[in-house]
Image (cartoon, rainbow, N blue to C red):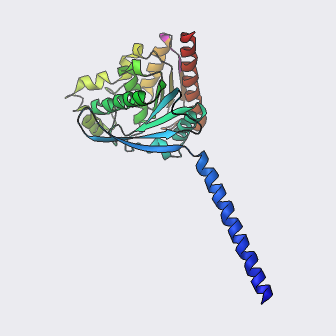
Amino acid sequence: MRLIMYNGGMKHRLVKGFLLFLLLVLAAVAATEPKTEDISFVASCDGSAERYVLLWPEGLAADKPFDLLIALHGHGSDRWQFVKDPRDECRAARDAAQRHGMLFVSPDYRAKTSWMGPKAESDVVQIIGALRKQYPVRRVFVCGGSMGGTACLTFAVRHPDCVDGVISMNGTANLVEYAGFQDAIAASFGGSKAEASSEYHDRSAEFFPERLTMPVGITAGGKDDLVPAQSVLRLAESLKKLGRAVLLIYRDNGGHATDYADATAVFDFVIQTARRASDMARG
């Protein structure tokens, strides 16, 4: 009987020790995970309830100046894509924010068919304004993939004074010629190409390269049939002729995706180039 009680006591202590170890491990993991805030706001353009997510990287102090990285999701997704998705573009964006000490911002911008129409654009402007009022924001960077890669270029040419760097992955720069997702784009833009032609033109970054005065990073694939690369290749060439800071990574055999290494390269190029330029401007 004594032996059985002894074994039972040993087992009890082992279980308690294992549970304590497990709790310590979980606490350590939780301590290193970024803090996430899901925020609701009333859109100034139409009074609707909209949302965005803040991802606070480890060690970022809310009372000291920092940069924003705004991540714009792809077609059919929402604000959680760049926050949770393990795909390379999303993971590279989150890692860039952590590596460079940036607050990571992921808006719905009228999910799931956003395409940076007038209401989506107004929402992003409102989010930036609200965060600038609440925190000591220095620079603002916008990034995205696919629809988000298109949207970040559109937003930058429409608000160049608000944007310090752009990272566009597998997007289009010409919505006049682009033939995909026409129902969703028409809903976002307030009509078809025939009905709202000025919106398609005015939201096409290719027609306004002179407005992209900030560093620009672009990735594209030669076998991308969903969002063909030709318009962003032309945009990159125009930017080079204007003497802009631009990094184009074009893969002949690439499809509608950017791998982690290429995504990391464009993020680091844009962020580091913009920071050097602003440091030089301050003297």
Residue furthest left as drawn: 195
Instruction: Say which residue appears at 24% left-offset and 29% top-offset.
Output: 193
Is residue 223 among what the camera can see? no
Name the residue nearer the viewer: 232 or 228: 232
Name the residue nearer the viewer: 34 or 89: 34
Q: Quadrant of residue 134?
A: top left
Q: How many marks?
A: 0
**For this view, does 219 lie left or right of residue 113?**
right
272 over 57 or under it: above or below: above
Q: Quadrant of the C terminus?
A: top right
Name the residue nearer the viewer: 34 or 226: 34
The majority secondary structure of the magenta stretch comes to loop
Name the residue nearer the viewer: 180 or 71: 71
Residue furthest right as drawn: 3
Instruction: Specify whether residue 245 is painted magenta.
Output: yes
- Rendered location of residue 38, percent (x, y): 41, 44
Q: Quadrant of the N terminus?
A: bottom right
70 over 49 or under it: above or below: above
Q: Quadrant of residue 18?
A: bottom right
Instruction: Say which residue appears at 62% left-offset and 56% top-offset.
Output: 26
Q: Which residues are magenta?
A: 241-246
Instruction: Specify whether residue 79 is painted magenta.
Output: no
186 over 165 or under it: above or below: below
Is residue 19 among what the camera can see? yes
- Rendered location of residue 11, percent (x, y): 73, 76
210 over 117 or under it: above or below: above
- Rendered location of residue 76, percent (x, y): 37, 44
**For this view, does 183 lie left or right of residue 164?**
left
